[in-house]
Amino acid sequence: MDWCTIVEVAVVAYIVLQLVRLLFADCDLQLQWTDKFGRSTGVLTRKVVWITGASSGIGEYLSYELAKAGCRLVLSARREGELQRVKKECLSYGTLMDDDILVLPLDMLKFDLHQPAVDEVLSRFKQIDVLVNNAGRSQRAQWEKTDLQVDRDMLEINVLSVLSLTKLVLPHMLERKEGHIVNMSSVSGKLGSPLSGSYTGAKHALQGWFDCLRVEMFPRNITVTNICPGPVFSNLLKGSFTENSGELLGVEMKEGEKRMNTRRCARLCAVAIANKLDEVWIALQPILLFVYIGQYMPTIAGWCFKRAGVKFMMKFREGQH
Ligand SMILES: NC(=O)c1ccc[n+]([C@@H]2O[C@H](COP(=O)([O-])OP(=O)(O)OC[C@H]3O[C@@H](n4cnc5c(N)ncnc54)[C@H](OP(=O)(O)O)[C@@H]3O)[C@@H](O)[C@H]2O)c1
């Protein structure tokens, strides 16, 4: 065999290996590799991590992962009782003292309360190492029937409240010359998700805003991580918007549905944070494959998604395949 053939065989073998890895993966290949061979979440020990939306779902389980890693935590959401429950569970791992966790009730839509909240965290811990912008809402609605007020409300909770809090935390991080902003985006921040126009638009906006910040902040030692989960078990559908202003979907996710386990999703989020990855995709198949095709072969993806139709795509999204 000449050198050209050896190189060709090596390239084909590499591509086949990556495809096989991808078929069995529940996250993008970089994160899968990092989970096995990257830095352990132990590097986060004693870091101060502020998680919004910590009272339920992904934020709740991420709090547990980070508590196990020994992070000092600020837990925020609107329901104080639920935050106290999460705090109790975090303390049960034996890695933290009562003083290491601050329960800080905060309605992200009350923008005037953001500065006092930042002040309270800094007066308690003197530093914020990581801000996890996780609080958010989803949607099920037909695009053409969606009230413009729903679009506005979606942008308020999923984008503007995140920008507001981040803008208040950034000066502190810049002063310390270090910091990490983490955003809970979605696979819907990468692909168009039918019947979730406002949500998809908001998550795309979040990606755009923070992709710019990442480049601007790189020389100043501030990291930006965008996390894009696919369907994950949580209470997201209960509080999801519909097409009508003020209406909530009120749907519970059911056990048999094909969604990722919340603990697994949170574990991968913690790995992404510990390793300061720029963007990660966390989803079961075939959604993960759809994201890969959407990212690397957008023309083919566009052709397929249009022809597959809304019903077909929603089956995967609702875990009914
Ligand atoms: N689960 C999924 O399939 C999935 C997929 C992709 C992305 N995501 C994203 O993951 C994030 C977390 O969602 P989840 O799935 O864990 O849903 P979840 O169980 O419903 O959790 C949402 C969290 O956001 C908080 N929240 C909602 N409105 C708030 C407000 N106005 N102010 C402060 N906190 C507020 C809720 O707490 P309170 O009600 O106590 O305020 C709750 O802790 C969201 O950004 C979502 O878009 C989820």
Image: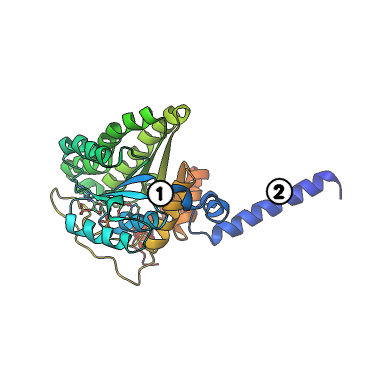
Residue 258, image x, y percentages: 39, 66
- Residue shown at 81% from the left, 48% from the top: 5
Within 10 angstroms of label 1, few (less than 14), some, or many (20 or more) residues? many
The amino acid pointed to by label 2 is: Val
Which one is in front, 172 or 300? Answer: 172
Does residue 78 show up?
Answer: yes
Which of the two discs, 1 and 2, sits closer to the camera? 1
Q: Quick check: 277 above or below 140?
A: above
Residue 126, image x, y percentages: 31, 37
Does residue 301 show up?
Answer: no
Residue wearing tag 2? 11
- Residue shown at 21% from the left, 37% from the top: 114
Residue 181, image x, y percentages: 37, 39
Residue 94, image x, y percentages: 36, 61
- Mark 1 close to ligand 1, CB under 8 Å: yes
- Extreme residue toward the right, this view: 1
Helix, strand or loop status at disc 2: helix
Residue wearing tag 1? 228
Who comes first in sequence, dot 1 or dot 2? 2
- Residue shown at 46% from the left, 30% from the top: 218
